[in-house]
Amino acid sequence: MKLHATLLAAACALALAACGDDSRAPDTAAPPASTPDATAGTTPGTDDATTAPDAGYPAPVDGTAAADGTTPADGTAAAPGDTATADAQPAAGGCSVDVEGNDQMQYNVSSITVPSSCAEFTINLTHVGRLPEAAMGHNVVVTSTPDMAGVAADGISAGASAGYLKAGDERVIAATEMIGGGESTSVTFDVAKIRDGGPYSFFCSFPGHAALMKGTISVN
Ligand code: ZN
């Protein structure tokens, strides 16, 4: 995994722009899982007379083209815009999500939705930058949102050798190891831990990073 990531990082160095595009492609290709039930029901009752001749379009099935009922033929305009936002949607039926951290102290996602059908959920973290762990380390820590600041502060006190997490911190629901540029890691946790209560957040516990590297995680 690390070798692959290193090669990927090397490829990025050769073609930064293209690599950036590639890294976003999986997100935009993913189905907008959160929208279908909200919009799919609007078309049949509102303008079935005008759209009936075009009934062969599969758009109503995924709901992306049915939002306003006026653009069944070119409804693709709705989906890319929605998925361009920084929501990390797991692949359909998948109980995992891919998160990237970069040398600009950023994740590529600001929210994670865990399908309620999952018993366990895996967060895969890839550091797509090139800076070493000591300078730009990244991890993913899941806590309740109110616990986030305290866990981050205690993590800084614990220091680099502890991966910037206090040993045995019971507020930590899940945490990956701290990694540097070109490395990957993952953590799997019991979804029951975030099914009730909340809200819950994820963040990087490297000193100062949680100011930018944070987001929400919820079961839906
Ligand atoms: Zn970080």
Image (cartoon, rainbow, N blue to C red):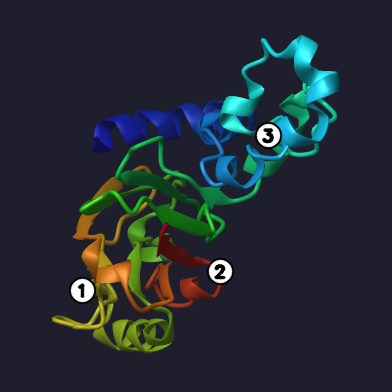
Residue 158 drawn at (x, y percent): 25, 84
Mark 3 lies on a secondary structure that is helix
- Quarter holding residue 73: top right
**N-term mark: 3 or 1:** 3
> Looking at this view, is 138 or 113 the one in front?
113
Query: Visible in this render: residue 73?
Result: no
| Along the viewing direction, whichever of 65 and 170 lies nearer the viewer | 65
Tell me if label 2 and label 1 are in contact, CB under 8 Å: no
Q: Nearer the viewer, mark 2 or mark 3?
A: 3
Report if the CB atoms under discs 3 and 1 are less than 8 Å apart.
no
Query: What amino acid type should be assigned to the residue bearing mark 2?
Result: Leu
In space, the residues marked 2 and 3 are separated at their CA atoms by 27 Å
- SS class of the residue under badge 1? helix
Looking at the rendered image, the quarter that the C terminus falls into is bottom left
Q: Where is mark 3, residue-wise?
A: 79
Q: How many marks?
A: 3
Relative height, residue 181 to residue 152 (above, below) = above
The residue type indicated by label 3 comes to Ala
C-alpha span from label 2 to label 1: 23 Å
Of the pair 27 and 161, the residue shown nearer to us: 27
Decide if residue 2 is in sight here: yes
Q: Is residue 29 above or below residue 90?
A: above
* Residue found at the very far left of the displayed protein: 168
Q: Residue at x 37, y 88 (%)?
A: 153
Residue 71, position as x, y percentages in the image: 82, 26
Rendered image quadrant of residue 169 = bottom left
- Splitting the image into 4 quarters, where does residue 116 fall? bottom left
Residue 204 vs residue 160, the one in the foreground: 204
Q: Which mark is residue 161?
A: 1
**Ligand 1 sits in which quadrant?**
bottom left
Label 3 CA crowd tier, 10 Å (few <14, some 14–19, many 20+)? some
Badge 2 is on which residue?
A: 212
